Amino acid sequence: MINEEDIGVTDALEDDIKRRQRYSLEFKNDVIKHVQEHKNQSETGRFFNVDRRLVCEWFKKKEKIEKTSFKRRRSRVTSETALSRFPEMEKELLIWFTNERDKNRSINGIDIKLTALKIHEPLYLAK
């Protein structure tokens, strides 16, 4: 009896399965610039090894892609002091959260908000 593995059927099936790939905004911007310079989306697709339909879609959305990349560069947190407005409260809240989870208690968003308010008052309003 011939086995599927002997004739390479499983390999062929695995090759046909394509994984969805994510492309960075920087890569998309490079593709868009190439299209603008060369005026040919199919050629750009072959150059970057990307399907021409994706190139077409990115080119149609070029303004949104450019704005998004600019926005992301501006919104990065650059220093550790800019991470939180209430670092002491967050530390206390994390301790509370960890203790509650260690006791196998479920926690919802309302519990977190109420506890944060209880912790916030003595730390920041009493000063």
Image (spheres, grey):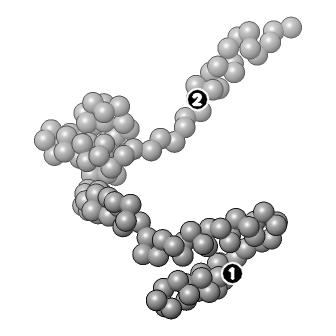
Q: Residue 33's x, y, as percent?
A: 19, 45
Drawn side of residue 81 relative to residue 69, left or right? right
The residue carrying mark 2 is 16
Q: Secondary structure at mark 1?
A: helix
Q: Quadrant of residue 51?
A: top left
Q: Residue 110's x, y, as percent?
A: 66, 83
The disc placed on residue 111 is: 1
Q: Farthest front residue?
A: 127
Q: Residue 68's x, y, as percent?
A: 31, 61
Residue in the foreground of this view, choosing between 127 and 64: 127
Q: Secondary structure at mark 2?
A: helix
Q: Is residue 32 above or below residue 79?
A: above
Amino acid bearing label 1: Asp
Q: Quadrant of the N terminus?
A: top right
Amino acid bearing label 2: Asp
Drawn side of residue 114 relative to residue 4, left or right? left
Q: Is residue 26 above or below residue 78?
A: above
Residue in the foreground of this view, choosing between 105 and 29: 105
Mark earlier in primary sequence (2, 1): 2
Q: Residue at x 25, y 47 (%)?
A: 29
Other-residue count near label 2 (Cα within 10 Å), few / some / many at <14 / 14–19 / ≥20: few
Q: Residue at x 25, y 59 (%)?
A: 70
Dots 2, 1 in contact, CB < 8 A: no
Rounded to the nearest whole Å, what is the CA distance between mark 2 and mark 1?
48 Å
Residue in the foreground of this view, choosing between 62 and 83: 83
Q: Residue at x 39, y 44 (%)?
A: 23
Other-residue count near label 1 (Cα within 10 Å), few / some / many at <14 / 14–19 / ≥20: few
